[in-house]
Image: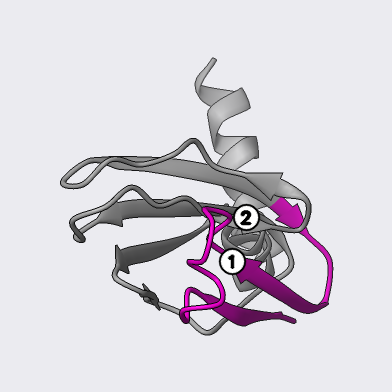
Amino acid sequence: MKRALAALAGAVALAGPGVLAWSQASAATSVNVSMTEFKFGLSKSSVAKGAVTFKLVNKGSVTHDLKIAGKKSKEIAPGKSGSLKVTLKPGSYRYICTLPGHAQSGMKGVLKVR
């Protein structure tokens, strides 16, 4: 058992810092989203490609949601929170609140994915 652990430790040491960078790149990205009347506040304006989890908090006084890349969150009541997980390829993605009149009132934006 000790010999197997020593061999594994040696292999990891030989692999070097590239292994750590790869594991970090494969981790999901989180974006905090504040929702109010009538705007979104995102903690990041661009993200790396791959899995992205939007952590939604409704700080407003009416219900909101988030739609991006064809996926839509549940409606989030005032003072409540939720999340939406999507997988994104490089490009630009429009996001909106789908409730009537919200996007037209300013609840929209573009997220860049690199």
Q: Tell me where residue 49 sits by quadrant.
A: bottom right
From the viewer's perspective, tell me whether residue 86 is left or right of residue 2. Answer: right
Position of the C terminus, as image quadrant, is: bottom right
Q: CA distance from mark 2 to mark 1?
A: 5 Å
From the viewer's perspective, tell me whether residue 33 is left or right of residue 18. Answer: left
Dot 1 falls on a residue whose secondary structure is strand
Residue 92 colored in magenta in the image: yes
The vertical placement of 91 against 33, above or below, is below
Q: Earlier in the sequence, mark 2 or mark 1?
A: 2
Query: Magenta stretch?
Result: 87-114
Identified by mark 2, the residue type is: Lys
CB within 8 Å, label 2 to label 1: yes
The vertical placement of 114 against 34, above or below, is below
Q: Tell me where residue 9 sits by quadrant.
A: top right
Dot 2 falls on a residue whose secondary structure is strand
Q: Is the image coloured rainbow, by chain, by secondary structure, or in one colour?
A: one colour
Closest to the observer: 37 or 46?
37
The residue positioned 54% from the left and 57% from the top of the image is: 100
Kindly identify which numbered label has been placed on residue 96. Answer: 1
The residue positioned 64% from the left and 37% from the top of the image is: 7
The vertical placement of 50 against 71, above or below, is below
Query: Which percent across, then down, holds residue 53?
Result: 52, 51
Residue 96 colored in magenta in the image: yes
Query: Which percent across, then down, holds residue 56?
Result: 37, 52
Closest to the observer: 105 or 79?
105
Position of the N terminus, as image quadrant, is: top right
Query: Which percent across, then down, holds residue 22?
Result: 68, 62
The residue at which mark 2 appears reads as 67
The vertical placement of 97 against 62, above or below, is below
The residue positioned 36% from the left and 74% from the top of the image is: 38
Identified by mark 1, the residue type is: Ile
Closest to the observer: 54 or 8?
54
